[in-house]
Image (cartoon, rainbow, N blue to C red):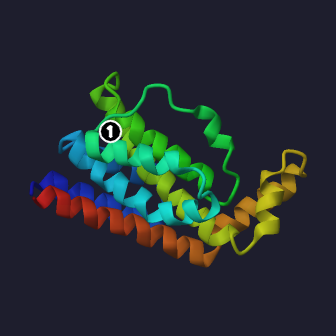
Amino acid sequence: MSNQLEQDLHTLRVAAQQREWNMSQDTLKQLLAQVDPLVALGIAVSRAQNFLPAFETYYPQAGWVRELMLQIVSYATAPSDLPLEALTQFPEPGCGNFIMAVFDMARAVQSEASFFERYSSITNAVANSILADLQHTYYSQRRGEYDLMCDPDADPDMAAQVQYAFWLDGNVAQRDADTWLDVADEVEAMLAR
């Protein structure tokens, strides 16, 4: 492994520990661009698969999501007309971000996507899967806070306080850092192959 790749992995791990999402995503994209997009997609797929059981517990009737994931993984294709209205149809904690992650993975394999767009979509899919997990873990135990945050008529200051409490929660912070560190380990193993 080159010195630059080792430095980028170090940067990703430091950004993870400091919860610097912009740096984490930028560095992840640089690292993923070192391999074929379909190989890089594996990092996003593993993150999304981790959340799929929680999603299916809430929405067992939404089998199309699993089918889309299988199409992405098995055939490296996805329809160009994704049902964007689905982004708001799954209001349980973390499920909206999960759907965004699945759509990001789909965009990564669409034939019209440029090389740059593929890596951006894969990186976004990883980040949205992580956010889905963090939101689900935190807000499934605090349903009232989640409902307040999602209520368009709620006091904006109250909603901001709820979001602030979520982001500063010690368990969320630890899970966030640990998950990004796991991603760094997966990327390192992928690059070592």
Q: Quadrant of the N terminus?
A: bottom left
Q: Secondary structure at mark 1?
A: helix
Instruction: Give residue 6's position: percent from left, percent from top.
Output: 18, 59
Along the horizontal axis of the image, is 150 left or right of 50?
right
34 relative position to 15: left or right: left
* Residue topped by disc 1: 119
* Figure quadrant of residue 141: bottom right
Q: What residue is rendered at 49% in x and 26% in y?
A: 81
- Nearer to me, 179 or 177: 179
Q: Residue type at mark 1: give it.
A: Tyr
Where does the image place residue 90, in percent across and percent down from the top left?
Answer: 66, 50
- Position of residue 56 relative to residue 68, above or below, is below
Is residue 13 or residue 107 the one in the foreground?
A: 107
Locate residue 27, reporting x and y percent: 33, 49
Q: Which picture quadrant has residue 121?
A: top left
Picture quarter with the C terminus: bottom left
Residue sitting at x 43%, y 56%: 48
Q: Is residue 82 above or below residue 134?
A: above
